[in-house]
Image (cartoon, rainbow, N blue to C red):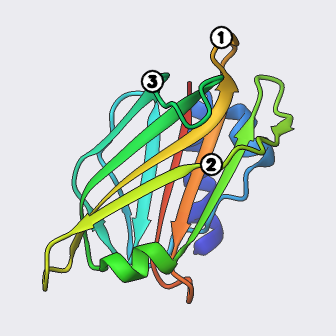
Amino acid sequence: MGKSIFLAVLSFLLAHNFIAAQNNAVLPEKLKTSIVLKTQAGVTAQANGIKCGTILVEIDTTVTVSPKYAYLSIDFTEVEGTNQLEVMMGNNIVWIFDKTGKEIVVKERFLKRTNAAMGANMVKMLVKIPYRLKTDNNPYTIHYRWETKDKSKNLDLITTK
């Protein structure tokens, strides 16, 4: 059953021109708790073990930490089923592919900010990933994954910008 779900996700990605991502990215199998998240056009996301409200994905060229790079800004609001400590201690994995499907390694660090209400099981997370030079206008496929240390909860997002 897991293989058929994986093939369904893979065909969905192909239908949305994510050829580079499907050739190189390590896409997770859909688990029993997987939820395909509502996102804007050109973005595919799923969550396992948690729920996520709005996801806003845009290009940010105003970051001054490394001013030569354009950053992919991913704003996850209302992430339910986790807490701030779990988000901060979790693993963040990023894969970046050029238009030919070749994996690109960016040595600049990505930025992350989390906010949570005391006692609430809801977190807001903002991630900024450097993925191309500001002067480079070629499309890149970015696959971002956050997962807890025990891998019981995760967020996966793929987009081409």
Task: Give the secondary structure at mark 1.
Answer: loop
Q: Nearer the viewer, residue 88 or 97?
A: 88
- Give the mark toward the camera: 2 or 1: 1
Q: Please tell me which residue is depicted at 44% across the width and 50% down the height of the picture.
A: 45
**Kind of residue sitting beneath label 3:** Thr
> Residue 62 has which mark?
3
Disc nearer the start of the sequence (1/3): 3
Residue 14 lies, in percent from the top left, at: 63, 35
* Residue 106 shows up from this direction: yes
Q: Please tell me which residue is depicted at 56% across the width and 37% down the height of the picture.
A: 65
Disc nearer the start of the sequence (3/2): 2
Q: Nearer the viewer, residue 32 or 113?
A: 113
The quarter of the picture where the C terminus appears is: top right
**Kind of residue sitting beneath label 2:** Leu
**Kind of residue sitting beneath label 1:** Asn
The residue at which mark 2 appears reads as 10
The residue at which mark 1 appears reads as 137
Does residue 40 lie above or below 31 as drawn?
above
